Image: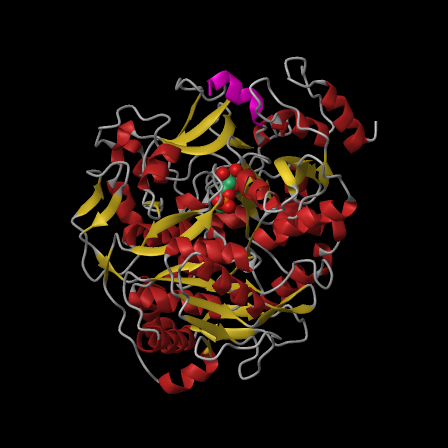
């Protein structure tokens, strides 16, 4: 496909992104600066390209190593970077054991049930230690798992999730947590790809006031896995209420086991953490990309943990006395890095909230903040939009004080940013708009909260040690302040970055490094800029405004969905001939998918069929992927070479100008579809 043709056949979010005017700077409150972990601008010099890669020793030194590394960065297998080579470390030890001497009585995890009348659970570091050890005993002695094996977790937002993750890490077992909201089918795909034979789940959890049967998804997943000739030997089922089974689905004899029953046998067992090479895989996190199949971003132990510990301390500004709440889901990378590994590595108290932010009303988060005296808050624009819409005056009713707030996952509109700052933050908090991705392990761009002023709508410059650069399609550098958008890349590797795509190095290289590689045989990191897949405009002051994806990824409420994944889900319905999905702007979700369908000859459209297609998407992927609408059209707008013009469909869905369609093979269809969608 020629570059030009590619441009017109794809709808990127950048094309429909709102073009905001530059906003004025807002300076962090003096009270924040007075207490911040990093106030000295020389941090940027310490982490300059001249001091690369040794600057990252500063982060690695926040951890406790069994053996210190001999090589900071090994580039011999470029672009698969190896960090802290020769080092031996255990992530579970770093997040738990090493804190016990001074902090065993400190709360590690505050678990907040969605049911407001239920008591908040405060799990101390000592209790976390006990529970992780006992669960690790099940993994090792009951399941026979060992370092290097993979297990799949499909768990909701409960304290048992980090307990499970840390128990895996203790033994060097690679965990792959699948977002709890994903369907059993989506879970199965990830079980197969990761090669897991053990699935860990929970019977039920609360969502919007309902105790949902989650175990049924495990049954679907195991059945789907069997179709791929792989076997799940054991399903470990945590109970939302220990000792009581809260799901309707029966347990399968010999395959399904209640964790709380198995635990009785391992009471008091202690499992020594296994010293792992820094480069050992800590976990997989599946994410959507340009092709249909989700890919497993493979994260390391030493580099990853160093990076999330460092950025938790420097960017999140977590101090020992803080109460830190990240309202993301642990099923996504944000939760792994900034609910579990980062905060626990630096001995913070981290809050886990089970449910929906607006349940039972939009005052809920602020009551939790008030009751736990949370002072660092971290969430996504989609949640901020929903809370703003449903309860704009709620924050003022509660007595809490944030010193620091984070936003992550999507571009935040300046108006929403300002509500976050004034209403939620009461003008007292520094805001970090953190831009990064599943593949990155931790933040790429953000202001340093006590050093750089905030600019609503702009993520900010690269965080210390991250050096962004913008290229145009031909590889020319787009200079800062040119007002032009381009493909934002990172010039240098960093320790938090994924090592590769699980079992697919070729895809790793082609998708992230090929485009701007200066020499495919080079072993120098300087020749391998990392392609993020986002478009951005960088202002003269170095602040990046992220416009959205340049590839076929739709970001719904901060959840990454591949257009191809959605389309192939629709194609599972026998009547469907062609499917095309486009992002359409949504007040709260940012965008949502709009699905266009052409049917096989002889089949007529009906509401029933549209419903069936919508349901197929929910079954294949999960409710988060449910389309706004399924438009069954007589034909797709196509180029003469037969390619579906998603750009045109995107314009119709968003009520924007469809542009010149006369070169299409079937321009008349555009009028027809417009009438159908817009009613005119
Ligand atoms: C988008 C989430 C604008 C971006 C940590 C990226 C953002 C994708 C921001 C990754 C932000 C994330 N401003 N856009 N602050 N943060 N994005 O893998 O398009 O779920 O490529 O990682 O979300 O989503 P992912």
Q: Is 601 rendered above or below residue 408? A: above
Point out the stretch of residues depicted in magenta. 1-10
Task: Give coordinates of residue 324: x percent, y percent.
Answer: 51, 59
Q: Nearer the viewer, residue 575 or 319?
A: 575
Choose between 574 and 360: the one closer to the eye. 574
Horizontal side of residue 55 vs 438, given as left or right? left
What residue is shown at x 29% (from left), y 54% (from top)? 302
* Residue 344 belongs to magenta span: no
Instruction: Judge whether residue 4 is colored magenta.
Output: yes
505 horizontally vs 343: left or right: left
Q: In percent of the image, x 27 and y 69: which residue is there?
A: 273
- The percent coordinates of residue 221 (x first, y second) are 50, 62
The answer to which of 382 and 644 lies nearer the viewer is: 644
Quarter in which the C terminus is drawn: top right
- Main SS of the magenta segment? helix
Q: Position of residue 269 (x, y in %)?
A: 32, 82
Question: What colour scheme does the image use?
Answer: secondary structure
Q: Residue at x 31, y 69 (%)?
A: 145
How many numbered circles are shown?
0
The quadrant in which residue 565 appears is top right
Residue 104 seen: no
Residue at the limit of the structure toward the left, as seen here: 70
Classify 10 as above or below 98: above
| Residue 97 seen in this snapshot | yes
The location of residue 522, given as percent across then percent down, is 22, 28
**Extreme residue in the right direction:** 680
Residue visible at 40% across and 17% down in the picture:
476
């Amino acid at each position: 496909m020629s570059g030009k043709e590619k441009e017109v056949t794809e709808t990127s979010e950048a094309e429909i992104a709102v073009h905001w005017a530059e906003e004025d700077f807002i300076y962090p409150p003096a009270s924040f600066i007075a207490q911040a972990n990093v106030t000295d601008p020389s941090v940027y010099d310490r982490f300059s390209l001249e001091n690369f890669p040794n600057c990252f020793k500063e982060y690695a030194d926040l951890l406790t190593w069994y053996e210190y590394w001999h090589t900071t960065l090994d580039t011999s297998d470029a672009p698969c970077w190896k960090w802290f080579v020769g080092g031996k470390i255990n992530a579970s030890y770093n997040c738990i054991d090493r804190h016990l001497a001074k902090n065993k009585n400190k709360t590690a995890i505050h678990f907040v049930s969605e049911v407001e009348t239920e008591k908040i659970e405060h799990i101390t570091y000592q209790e976390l230690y006990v529970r992780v050890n006992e669960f690790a005993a099940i993994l090792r002695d009951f399941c026979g798992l060992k370092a290097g094996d993979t297990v799949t977790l499909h768990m909701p937002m409960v304290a048992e999730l980090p307990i499970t993750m840390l128990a895996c890490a203790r033994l060097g077992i690679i965990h792959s947590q699948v977002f709890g909201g994903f369907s059993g089918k989506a879970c199965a795909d990830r079980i197969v790809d990761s090669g897991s034979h053990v699935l860990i789940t929970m019977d039920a959890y609360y969502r919007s006031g309902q105790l949902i049967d989650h175990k049924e998804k495990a049954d679907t997943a195991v059945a789907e896995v069997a179709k791929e000739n792989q076997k799940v030997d054991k399903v470990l089922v945590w109970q939302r209420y220990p000792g009581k089974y809260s799901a309707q689905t029966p347990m399968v004899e010999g395959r399904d086991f209640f964790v709380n029953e198995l635990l009785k046998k391992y009471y008091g067992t202690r499992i020594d953490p296994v010293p792992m090479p820094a480069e050992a895989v800590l976990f997989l996190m599946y994410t959507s990309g340009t092709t249909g199949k989700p890919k497993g971003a493979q994260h390391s132990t030493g580099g990853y943990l160093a990076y999330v510990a460092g950025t938790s301390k420097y960017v999140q500004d977590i101090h020992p006395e803080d109460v830190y709440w990240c309202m993301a889901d642990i099923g996504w990378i944000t939760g792994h890095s900034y609910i579990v590994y980062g905060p626990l590595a630096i001995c913070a108290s981290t809050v886990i909230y089970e449910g929906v932010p607006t349940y039972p009303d939009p005052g809920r988060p602020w009551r939790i903040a008030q009751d736990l005296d949370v002072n660092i808050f971290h969430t996504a624009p989609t949640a901020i939009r929903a809370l703003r819409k449903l309860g704009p005056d709620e924050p003022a009713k509660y007595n809490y004080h944030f010193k620091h707030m984070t936003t992550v996952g999507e571009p935040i509109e300046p108006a929403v940013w300002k509500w976050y700052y004034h209403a939620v933050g009461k003008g007292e908090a520094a805001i970090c708009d953190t831009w990064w991705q599943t593949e990155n392990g931790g933040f790429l761009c953000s202001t340093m909260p006590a050093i750089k002023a905030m600019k609503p709508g702009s993520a900010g410059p690269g965080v210390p040690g991250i050096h962004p650069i913008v290229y145009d399609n031909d590889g020319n550098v787009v200079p800062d302040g040119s007002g032009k958008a381009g493909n934002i890349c990172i010039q240098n590797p960093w320790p938090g970055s994924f090592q590769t795509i699980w079992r697919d190095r070729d895809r790793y290289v082609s998708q992230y490094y090929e485009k701007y590689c200066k020499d495919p045989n080079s072993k120098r990191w300087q020749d391998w800029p990392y392609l993020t897949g986002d478009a951005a405009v960088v202002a003269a002051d170095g602040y990046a405004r992220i416009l959205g994806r340049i590839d076929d990824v739709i970001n719904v409420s901060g959840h990454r969905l591949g257009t191809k994944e959605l389309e192939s889900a629709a194609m599972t319905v026998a009547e469907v001939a062609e499917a095309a999905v486009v992002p359409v702007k949504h007040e709260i979700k940012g965008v949502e998918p709009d699905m266009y369908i052409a049917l096989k000859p002889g089949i007529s459209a009906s509401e029933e069929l549209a419903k069936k297609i919508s349901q197929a998407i929910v079954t294949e992927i999960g409710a988060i992927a449910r389309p706004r609408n399924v438009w069954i059209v007589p034909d797709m707008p196509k180029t003469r070479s037969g390619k579906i013009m998603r750009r045109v469909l995107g314009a119709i869905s968003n009520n924007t100008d469809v542009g010149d369609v006369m070169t299409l093979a079937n321009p008349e269809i555009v009028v027809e579809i417009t009438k159908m969608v817009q009613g005119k």
